[in-house]
Amino acid sequence: MTDKAIDSRVRIGHVHLKVADLERALAFYHGVLGFEITQRMGRQAVFLSAGGYHHHLGLNTWDSAGGKPPPPGSTGLYHVAILYPTRALLADALRRVLAGGVELDGAADHGVSEALYLRDPDGNGVELYWDRPKEQWPHDANGGLAMSTRPLDLDALLKER
């Protein structure tokens, strides 16, 4: 094992999710959240993007058609986090989610970010969030990051334009 840290330019490029029903998943990720379809592979897989990238999300039924979510107490994906570049765009995402009839599991102000938590139709956790500018991040007395979990004012967020 090496002590050298990973290069700071490394990014997570995409998430690929197993889904039970491709059209139902598309209704959420494309219809509600607004991701663009970049490629379809028949009725088994679809690739989605924001802004023309080849894909940020892959959805497939290769090993999961008609399947059920993992039971509580099992390992697996906790949530996929979708980063919005501004608070106003996070507010737009909240409007889309509410208009789509999707229930929130929660909403939080973490000091470094504001986040909305929900579930996709297959029970996968989804976090929609924006990061505050780094110079606004809270720090403790020793200079370490001081993230927290406080309630997020959804009414104030919805007033964001």
Image (cartoon, rainbow, N blue to C red):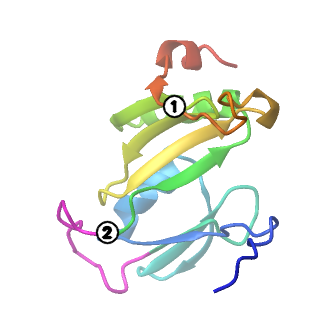
Residue holding disc 1: 148
Q: Earlier in the sequence, mark 2 or mark 1?
A: 2
Label the magenta part by its dominant secondary structure: loop
Q: Is residue 99 visible?
A: no
Q: How many marks?
A: 2
SS at circle 1? loop
Q: Is residue 112 magenta?
A: no
Identify the image quadrant of residue 104: top left
Q: Is residue 30 above or below residue 159?
A: below
Give 37 or 10, whichever is nearer the viewer.
Answer: 10
What is the three-letter code of the residue carrying label 2?
Asp
* Label 2 vs label 1, nearer the camera: 1
Where is residue 108? Give x, y as percent: 47, 30
Q: Which residues are magenta?
A: 60-75
Crowdedness near tag 2: few (<14), some (14–19) or many (≥20) residues, C-alpha within 10 Å: some
Q: Which mark is residue 21?
A: 2
SS at circle 2? loop
